[in-house]
Structure formats: C-alpha cells, structure tokens
Image: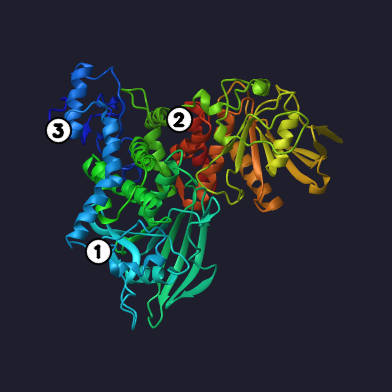
Amino acid sequence: MRAPADGDVISAIHVQTHSDFFLSPYNQYVAIKFPNAPSRADSGEHAMSKTVWGKAEAREEGIQQRESTEEEERRVDRIGSGKKEKSGSVRSQEKERFSETDGERENKERRGREREGEIESASADYLSASVINVETRILLDDHTRVRLQLLDGDPHSDYINANYIDGYHRPRHYIATQGPMQETVRDFWRMVWQENSASIVMVTNLVEVGRVKCVRYWPDETEVYGDIKVTLIETEPLAEYVIRTFTVQKKGHHEIRELRQFHFTSWPDHGVPCYATGLLGFIRQVKFLNPPDAGPIAVHCSAGAGRTGCFIAVDIMLDMAENEGVVDIFNCIRELRSQRVNMVQTEEQYVFVHDAILEACLCGNTAIPVCEFRAVYYNISRLDPQTNSSQIKDEFQTLNIVTPRVRPEDCSVGLLPRNHDKNRSMDVLSADRCLPFLISVDGESSNYINAALMDTTLTFQSHKQPAAFIVTQHPLPNTMGDFWRLVFDYNCSSIVMLNEMDAAQYWPEKNSCCYGPIQVEFISADIDEDIINRIFRICNMARPQDGYRLVQHFQFIGWPAYRDTPLSKRSILQLVRRLAKWQEQYDGGDGRTVVHCLTGGGRSGTFCAICSINEMIQQQNIVDVFHTVKTLRNNKTNMVETMEQYKFCYEVALEALNSF
C-alpha cells in the first residue's frame, strides 16, 4: 500500500482480511475494504466479513513506508489543508473541516447566494412559517424542500419544514423533517399521503429532559387529521424500538394504505448511544420492511437534523459499502447538508456515524430465518479440516474483537475502597452506567451491588420491563442483604440460580428470616428433574406499607461446576419456558429476573442469551446468536465467556425449533 502523495485526499484504503484491519499513521478517518461475501440467508455461508471499513487511529507498528515524524506531519498538512500548518494532526484538521462545514462555510455560502438572488430559502416567503418551525436555524433550500399541494384559498399552504434527501443511487429516497408540533400534525399526514410514504422513522422520544421534542401525532385507535384518517392496527414493542402499523385513508378516496412507524426509543437524552448495535438492528428492520415501490421514507427527530442525519448517513453508507466495498462518510454528510442544513449536527454524532459503520462491517448481518436455520447451522458448524476451525468459531473470535474493553475508570464505583469487600472478584466488575443502585436503606451500607442491568435484543412477552434481566454474582455472606434489597427495589419476581451450592445459602429453608431490611418468608418448594422451585414472600420491614411480593426461585442443578455448558439442552430450555410462564402468570410480565452464577459471568450470560433467542424465534422468526451476545456484552463483557457456551446457544436454538 503506497503512502499518500502530495495533494492526495485520503478517502479509501483497501486491505484483504479483517485480521489486517489497521490503524492509519495519518490519524485520519479511512475506509477499509474487505471481500464481499453473500449473506447467510442467501447461501448459508459466513457473512461476518462482507465489507469492513472504519475510523483509524495513529499506530507506529505494522505500517510500511513509514516516514519520519516531521516529514509525515508536513505531508499530512499538505493533504489535509493544501498548505503547511502547525497543527500536524489530520484528525484535528478533519474535525476542523467538519466544524467548518457545520457552520461558517455553509452560512457564508448561503448568505452569498441569498444576496445574489440564487435561492429563496429563508426568504420572506418563509417568514410566515417561522411559527411552525421547531428550530428556526433549520432553513430550507428551495431546490429540495417538500411542497405540499395547495389547500383551497391558501397560497401559503404548501409549506412544511421538510426536505427531499437522496439515497444511494436513489433520488429522493428520504424526507428529512422536523418532529410534528401541534400546529403541524395535519401537514405531516398530508405529506405522508401525498408522497406515498410507507415508512416513518422517528428518532426521538416525545419528552426528553423535561422538554417536549415532538407531539404524539398518531392515534391510540382511530383519528382524523385534516382529511387523513389514521387507524392504529398493531404495536410491536422491542427492546430499543417500537414498530407501529397503521392504515391511512384520504377523505373522498377509496384507497386504503398501510404504513409503519419505526420509533427508536433508545437514543439518550444527551449525546449519542454508547454503542451502535441497537441502531444498526433498527436500520436493518426498516430496510427489510419498507416496500421497494414505496415513496420516500419520512425521517424525523425533533429539528430533523442531527439524529435524522445520523440515521440517513449510516443507511446510505451501508448501501454504498455493500455495493462498492468502500464508504466516504465526509462527502456523504457534506452532500446531505447541501440538501438540508445541519444534518449530523455535532462532532460527537459525526464520530458515532463512523463507529456505527465500523461495527456494522465488522459484525455483518448475522440473523438467520428460522426456516433456514437447520441448513445454515450445519454449514457454519462444520469443521474445516485444513484450518481445524469452523465459521461459528470464527464468529466467536470476531465477537471477542468487537467486545468493548472496560477501563478502570468505567468501574469507578466498584473500585471504591468501601466496596471492595462486596466484590467476589475484582476482575469481574460492572460498568458504572449499568449498575442498579440500591434504594432501600440498610444502615451505613452503601447503595452498591456488583450487578448489571442487562439490555437484550428485544422486549420479552414475559418481561415487559426494559432491562428484563439483572445479572449478579452469588451473594457473599456480607452482601445477602444487598441481594434481597436488589430483588425488592427493582421489582424482581424471579431469581435464577445457575451454580452449584458451593457458596453461602441466602434463603431460609423454612419460616422466615431477615436479610438487612428485607424479610424473606419461605412458602413452598418442589423439585422437577433438574429444577428446584421455591416460592418466597418478601417485604421491606422499613416500609411495610409497600406490602408483600411473591418471588419464585429457580435453582438449576443440571450444570456441574466442571462443565462449561449444562448437561442437557432440553433441561435448560425447560427452565427458560418455566420462567416465562411464571412471569406471565404472576404479574403479567411487569417484574424483572435476577440471574446469577458464582461470579455473574459466562453461565448467567449464556442463560440470558438463550432466553432472548427463544423469544426471538417466537416473535421474529429469526435466530441471531451473534447480535444477542454482542448486545449483552455491551453491558457486561464476560457474558458467554467460552466458545463452548457460544456454540451451545446455537444448539439450544436448534432444540427449540425441533420442539415446536
């Protein structure tokens, strides 16, 4: 690979395998191409390395033709800016280019064009529309703005704050618009009908940090907005987004259309998501369900710029990567901004787009339709005699590569001296952002417990709470009170124990016992094959007005300490189904489940993954082991620790399909 020459602009660098993924000496965002491969659904072949590209960082080793630092800085300065500068950092220059595009350059060009009469956006024609703009800085380019059909007698009724956005070789594939306000709901539905949109993508919540970001523009049942009748047909809640299906009909028309709203609910109030895993799954679902002959996809956040731009940029780059094997994120966003200002508003969002693309191409699309799973599983589990490896093994190695690395500063609470004796191992700590801080007061005990709220790939029919599982270690003698406080504070109706009784018993065999402020009363017990079922009634003695709660304790005894996996696939599947049945019968799915093994690691993660995969089969008719485990590891890196546990998830999925 040659080093860039004077005057070059770095846009794409090609390598051959994902093991050769490298970090550029030029501190630049680069595109990295990998050989195209068919998806699993098409051929059963491994699709993990279809195309890979990403954000590169400086690294000294492994880079050929490396020049001296001074010469490199001079060369990079010429590449990044066309003249010698003192910064010496192309990454800084990249940010400056991005920042300039975000602000000064566009504003200067816009003011110049307006003075010369070349465009009409933000002109007097739009001043009357300022009352229906969420963000007055989002001014519309006249050549891309969506014009509504005029209403009788109103020459200004063609206005809506929306722009056509080109997709990858698809003119006007999207409409970027602001989130509907009370005054614009009717206009929004007029636009959806006029443009024959079959998909609405919503990348905001209705209220964030106490501020209304968008009004609820859809009905609970049926509502008429202007002359558009909208009827809600179905709501499908998933872990990070909701899919709502509607029918729409215009007054005086016999045609009834169906459309879907894809509502991404996991974008945080501030910044960007920690990981792009959820957004990538969301984008794939939109792609899969949007009809090929439909009109533009209507995308909105609040102002229709930052998050909207992120969604569209990632979608376009995924298409470009699949077709060309490279991406050009900088020029993609620059083109988006030529069609609507401020698309991808912040540097943080700009970096997130790169991270999302990197994750997408490293991980690929690993979902397998249930109708093809048996054949695909046979292919990917087959051992190659030449390499003594299988595609499942390669997949697990890729999973280890993309698993986030937890730094000491990420686990600062668990590392506090007062919490040391609450950890079974200082090597198995939960990140601060995932900790379930205890609420019930227990003397001078801290509110820390070594546990993690676990995100999953979907919302369980048996668990309607977000973060359906809380994974923790087997209680220590000094943390039993904390354990039961966790169960009570987080409304947990089930406990799943996956380790043998080689640690302290934390429940009473009869009568009742107090663990800290929580009274635990034994109700009943029975054993069925590999599962011991116990029912307890718990109460917070410091707050008796809160009443009692029933908790079922499932002790799984079919997993010996010497084995990475359970003895029986059928037994663990039986445990999964019993848990789901209890959750649904007892509290309608409103409770969470505490899952623990000795350390809160591989066994607990394997069980959570199997639960998620079993639910995925029933809800979505797919199996996606990789994505399931990747999502769990985003919150706790030791979920599904070994290759044997990872393969076991596939085997249980096959067992589940055979049992239907």
The residue lying toward the viewer, choosing from 46 and 485, is 485
User: Which mark sits nearer the N-terminus, 3 or 2?
Assistant: 3
x and y, in percent, of residue 280 in the image? 40, 45
Counting every numbered tag in the picture gives 3
Extreme residue in the left direction: 6
x and y, in percent, of residue 343 in the image? 33, 50
User: Which mark sits nearer the N-terminus, 1 or 2?
Assistant: 1
Query: In the figure, is residue 383 to the left or right of 478?
Result: left
Q: Name the residue under label 2.
A: 404
Q: Any mark on residue 8, and which?
A: 3
- Rendered position, 439 above or below 260: above
Decide: few, some or many residues near mark 3? Use Cα within 10 Å; few <14, some 14-19, many ≥20.
some
- Rendered position, 528 above or below 463: above
Secondary element at image label 2: loop
Q: Any mark on residue 142, and which?
A: 1
Residue type at mark 1: give it: Asp
Which quadrant does the N terminus fall into? top left
